[in-house]
Image: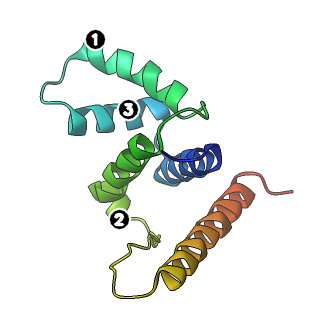
Amino acid sequence: MGTPQATKELQSQIKALISELGWSQNQLARVLYTELSDWDDEDEILKFQEKLKKELQRSTTKVERLTTYLEIITDHPDTQKLDVVFNKYIPSGAISKNLSQALGELSKEIDRSYLHKADQKKNPL
């Protein structure tokens, strides 16, 4: 289970990425629903759109769910066309736990920097 801070960071990453893609949250919901479901049911897609909007706002949304959403977005063909590098440290067990933690923190810092720059693009002063 993640922390509220981890949830907030993932929500921000998702929002920044869909902004970069030019997608609405409803468009994101359709992409996620079709990837996660066996059947495309218009009524269920509409329900999922509302559910997703809440999940992108609430601090209680599970980190695992948001991580799954982020993975689906980054694997989407539209995302592959972007001039963006997706930073994600995946521990391999080949290095010490302390170094692994430090690399994980570095990865998070790079994400925060990217999100800060994306926010500045949206809201220049």
Query: Is disc 1 in contact with disc 3, using a CB cutoff of under 8 Å?
Result: no
Residue 118, numbered label: none
Question: Which class describes the residues within 10 Å of circle 3: few (<14), some (14-19), or many (20+)?
Answer: many
Q: Residue at x 33, y 64 (%)?
A: 80
Q: Earlier in the sequence, mark 3 or mark 2?
A: 3
Q: Residue at x 44, y 69 (%)?
A: 86
Q: In the depicted view, which residue is nearer to us: 120 or 110?
A: 110
Asked if residue 45 lies left or right of residue 17, the reply is left
How far, Cα to Cα, is label 3 from label 2?
20 Å
For the residue labelled by badge 1, is the local secondary structure a helix, a strand or a loop?
helix
Residue 118: x and y, percent? 65, 60
Residue position marked by numbered label 3 in the rendering: 29
Amino acid type for the residue under numbered disc 1 = Asp
Q: Which of the labelled discs sits on residue 81, or is there none?
A: 2
Is 21 on the left or on the right of 69, as rendered?
right
- Mark 1 and mark 2: Cα distance apart in space: 31 Å
Q: Tell me what residue is drawn at x 28 percent, y 31 percent.
A: 33
Q: Residue furthest front?
A: 97
Q: For the point 12% across and 30% down, which residue is it?
A: 38
> Closer to us: mark 3 or mark 2?
3
Q: Nearer the viewer, mark 1 or mark 2?
A: 1
Scheme of image coloration: rainbow
Relative image position of residue 93 (x, y in whole percent): 34, 80
Residue 17 x %, y %: 50, 53
Left or right of 66? Residue 16 is right
Residue at far right of view? 125
